[in-house]
Amino acid sequence: MFEKSTDTAMARTGLVLTAVAVVQFMVSLDLSVVNVGLPQIATGLGFGALGLTWVIHAYALTFGGLLLLGGKAADRYGRRRVLQLGLVVFGLASLAGGFAQVPGQLVAARAAQGIGAATLAPAALSLLTATFPTGKQRIRAFGVWSAMNAAGGAFGVLAGGLLTQYAGWRWVMFVSVPMAAVALALAWRGVPTDSTTARAGRPDVLGAVLATAGMTLLVYGVVRTDRYPWSSATTLVTLLIAVALLAAFIAVEKTTRREPLIRLGLFANRSVSGANAFNLLVGAAMASAFYFTSLYLQRVLGIGPAETGVMFLPFALGVVVGAVLAVKLGYRLPARTLLAGGALLTAAGFAWFGLITADGSYLTNILGPSIIASVGFGLCLGPVVATATAGVDPRETGMASGLLNSTRQLGASLGLAAVGTAAHDRSGKSVTPQALSDGYALGFTLCAALLVAAALIAFGVVRRTNPAVQAERDLVPLRD
């Protein structure tokens, strides 16, 4: 009787892990599959050089700005229900994006994808945290999550290149539709209905609106510095309004009678605050680096999209290797050591990327730094999630998961805006291979600097104790 109950519980946790892994695979694939098709999307719909970045920004802004609300909704209304809703929205938005006829339609579809992802991503990660709260199973579960994150990136860059070249760029949007349907079926079958906690207050919708509006204006102001200098009235006013909106968001969180979108006391946990600050900088560096690598291969070296997708594979597979290493080292080393070491290793790879030239090649300028940077990035993925959710009340796991996803996506958007603008300024109005190469090289160097800063945060803010190892020790008396 006891063995049957144990087997049932193990099967249920296995189904939850499978459903979460598929969701993460889909979200990761959607990010990378679009990157490879950017040049063809620009040609097909008539995007300008900087306007093209809004294919990324539109997704990142709605994703990052609404993740806190999505995490709160998962805690309040049930992770299973919110996960399924997010998958429906994500799939329909992907379908609409594939049929886009003008730039505005594609940007709107990408924004809608971000809304769907903002609901499903924190719900999925919260499910993982709640299902595997302690011990070795937790380390392995986050290892699987990290590996699927990397696998989605690996398949995404390959599929993006092949689909763009042989089927057309529209299929980089269509490909997410069947995946969302499969993920929805898995969630329906594998994720049990979770009980929701009765709450007196309502979710803080106003806070979500203020946060999203503030971050949107902030990125918009940075991106437009190519037309309006930093010292211009237009840029200054835009940035001041953005700061005012974000300040209002913080004030609302402190004073609202509704359930705060994010309980500010959560930041008193050094693991939570340190992991999120680390995640912000890593997100900024990685999004920018992927963007520059894709453009360098296609616009400078003249490589086609399909071959570009294949050339991204070593990076994505290196992330898988790093994630596996993080699982093996997670029992021996503190989480902050893995975070700092991974960030420094990735920074070294990006600094090597910064040596690219107009007459370079894949073997001399891309392959070596790709392997170094990818392994370092893989070392960070699992530990940063485990650290950011360690010691968090089970009723707030959705909130903590939403916060972590939010900092990564907002970091990606702000990083791409700031670093992309700096690279564009270095290149100037010239579109010669040499000018473009110089701009991309500066971008990679700035990405390396961001990762060095992330490593310093890991050492200076995150506590030395490895949360997963400590949790394993806490279980010893119970076993006896």
Image (cartoon, rainbow, N blue to C red):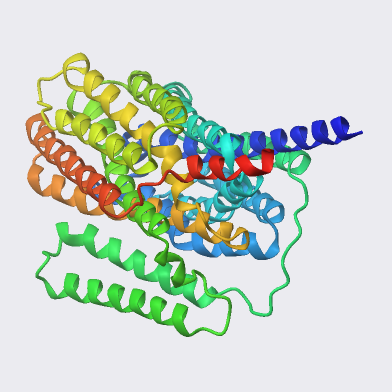
What residue occupies the far right of the structure in this picture? 1
- What residue is shown at x 38% (from left), y 40% (from top)? 334
Answer left or right for 36 relative to 259: left
- What residue is shown at x 21% (from left), y 42% (from top)? 447
From what the image shows, is residue 253 above or below residue 361?
below
The mark tally for this picture is 0
On-image quarter of the N terminus: top right
Answer left or right for 198 relative to 238: right
From what the image shows, is residue 381 above or below residue 364?
below
From what the image shows, is residue 406 above or below residue 174?
below
- What residue is shown at x 13% (from left), y 20% (from top)? 360
Q: Residue 245 placed where, x, y %?
A: 35, 77
- Depth check: 239 or 458 in front? 458
Task: Residue 62: tell me if it is visible.
Answer: yes
- Depth check: 176 or 261 in front? 261
- Depth check: 423 or 14 in front? 14
Q: Residue 345 placed where, x, y %?
A: 25, 31
What is the quadrant of residue 365 in the picture? top left
On-image quarter of the C terminus: top right
- What residue is shown at x 58% (from left), y 39% (from top)? 135
Answer left or right for 249 relative to 291: right
